[in-house]
Image: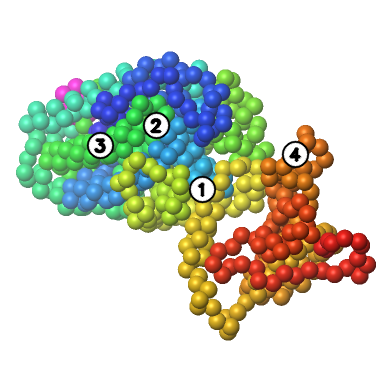
Amino acid sequence: MLMIRRSYISLLLAQSIFGTLKSPRFSSEFLDPNAANAPPSLPFPTFAVLLAPAEPPRPDPVVAEPVMLFLRRLAHSVSLSALVLSLLILSLLLFPLVLPSLSMCAISLKYSCSGRGYHKAFYMISRTLGPEFGGAIGALFYFANVFSSALYLTGCVEGIVQNFGVDGGTLSKVLPEGFWYSFAYGSALNMFNMLVCFVGAGMFAKATVVILFGVLVCLGSVVISFLALHQTIEVPIPGSNNLVQNDTFTTYGNYTGLSWSTFMDNLYPDYEKDYTTEDVTDFAMVFGVLFSGITGIMSGANMSGELKEPSRSIPLGTLMANLFTFVTYLLLFALSAASCTPFLLQNNYIYMMGINLWAPFVTIGIVTATLSASLSNIIGSSRVLAALVKDDIFGVMTSWIGKLTVGNNPIGAVVLSAIMVEAVLLIGSLNTIAKFTSIFFLLSYLSTNLATLGLEWASAPNFRPTFRYFSWWTCLLGIIGNGAMMFVISATEAGICTIVLLLLIIILHLRTPSEEIKWGSISQALIFHQVRKYLLLLDSRKDHVKFWRPQMLLMVANPRSACPLIDFANDLKKSGLYVLGHIKVGDMQSGILVSNSEESRVDLAAEDHPKWMALVDHLKIRAGPQVGKFVNLSEKISQIAKMVAGLATVLPKSVYLEIRNNPKSGLFFA
């Protein structure tokens, strides 16, 4: 029944306890070159920006927990898994949430601000892991937002139909029921969301204060109802429940008030069929459905550029939100188990309407909170897609979307996101959509842990977060836990999502965007860290002839005529060191080699290095090119072998030259 969205709690606590918004917006030019040219912040009220910022959007789909607790999640969990296993599930949910929270707190402070228009989680992951992995994770963020928007639209439609459906409406019987009718209602709401996005996300941000107030009132009314009503109340079973309902008479379930016997009846699990799908439930299914309602831990990170003290606000606000959510769920689980019979919980997922002091409170909460959550998710998905287009991750496949932008509003991304939501609505089953949503979120949390683990293992000098309550083992446990939870929820859906991720990584790798996008790759930092560590372990005093291997320096003047020689030396090297050397001769001024004139001073040696790397790749040899700069080659012949930087015993000890048959005057190499 808890309708307070997790992101709302996180940002509200961060603001009220630890800091206020900065004005004007602070942007970091060294993280995003375009940040200095970013437009100023929109004139949203501080409270509205904290609760549901529209620009930039949340990194994760904002979770409307009324879908979980008002509609079916609370009753679904307590009735099928009973109180004991429900509390176990709730405790297990902290594991894949708290550990990514620690990683998120650390990495979000490294990337505390970015240029306007970036999606924070995508920005953090892509800039850490590189374009291939970061782009694939960004695509998963997009799918997670799309599925979440469809999830909350489906939940909103179910709530409306169960209240106003012609067959089983509890308040009125006016709306036709059926799969295609529900799809039509969801499509209409999806169209409404798209129109709001066309007008501008500012409209939504200004309405968040009213939405939050209504949600808090509805939550308070439910808690008061549990404590105030002590008499037995017969709650009607919805007409859509074909497992126990019939056309002859209406079936009822009992609300007993707080009762020890009722509490004991709900203490142990009794898995039955889900009356909305008529499928037999189990622990994994309940876990997956419940998990879809408690995500959104990255919402605070998205506000790091808006907070005055993000180093304090993000970690403490996020962790306090986790604690607040856990305590609230615990309270509502216990109250429901102690006052509602198992029959009522299993056969009426909106039983709280029947026991509320004023039933329309629940309906108002369902419609406002789920619709606003769906809207915020379609806003988020369009911004993720806009960020992917902005960084040119998928090239021509998505470039057309960037052309359909009005101001800062990505119209093309909004339209495509709405179409994708429409496709997901065809699934129809809230439980199935919830499974995919949970798995997409778990993959995003896994990637956050992976990015933080990579930075920690690489000992990157620029990664010095002020948040210290994390380590490599918390990141590793988070990766293992998130991966395991995915397959616990559903091995099939987890396998599908993992295959999609791998295909995206392969496609982006084959496209080689790293040649065009200079973000850096964590893999290079990890390799350097490991190479340096093992080089320092080499001891020349322990060298022995039986372990000798070649350490060669081949001098090459013209690679076009020396390719056979390069291949021959590569065959000789066995598993030793092989370096290609090349000399640039000319005048030196302040370390810069002059090509033609003083006006065209360039570092020709540095410019040639990428070309030599391309030659090594083309010839498929294992060698490292080194380009040197000397004024007079005849005077520097003794320094040729020393031009290659080395450490300990890893230095070239043999210099290989080619003698031409028809040598010209002077000293040269070929």
Q: Amino acid at mark 2?
A: Ser
Which residue is identified by label 4?
601
Q: Amino acid at mark 4?
A: Arg
Tag 2 secondary structure: loop
Which residue is identified by label 1?
129
Tag 4 secondary structure: loop
Which residue is identified by label 2?
304
Q: Is residue 436 above or below residue 638?
A: above
Asked whether, in this view, residue 624 is left or right of residue 253, the answer is: right
Is label 4 in contact with label 3 (beta carbons under 8 Å)? no
Q: Is residue 466 above or below residue 411?
A: below
Residue at image position (14%, 27%) is 224
- Counting residues from the N terminus, which is met first, the one under dot 4 or under dot 1? 1
**For the residues carrying marks 4 and 2, which lies nearer the camera in this image?**
4
| Label 1 packing within 10 angstroms: few (<14), some (14-19), many (20+) | many
Residue segment shown in magenta: 353-359
Residue extending furthest toward the right: 662
Tag 3 secondary structure: helix
Residue at image position (72%, 69%) is 655
CA distance separating discs 4 and 2: 43 Å
Q: Is residue 418 above or below residue 290?
A: above
Which residue is identified by label 3?
320
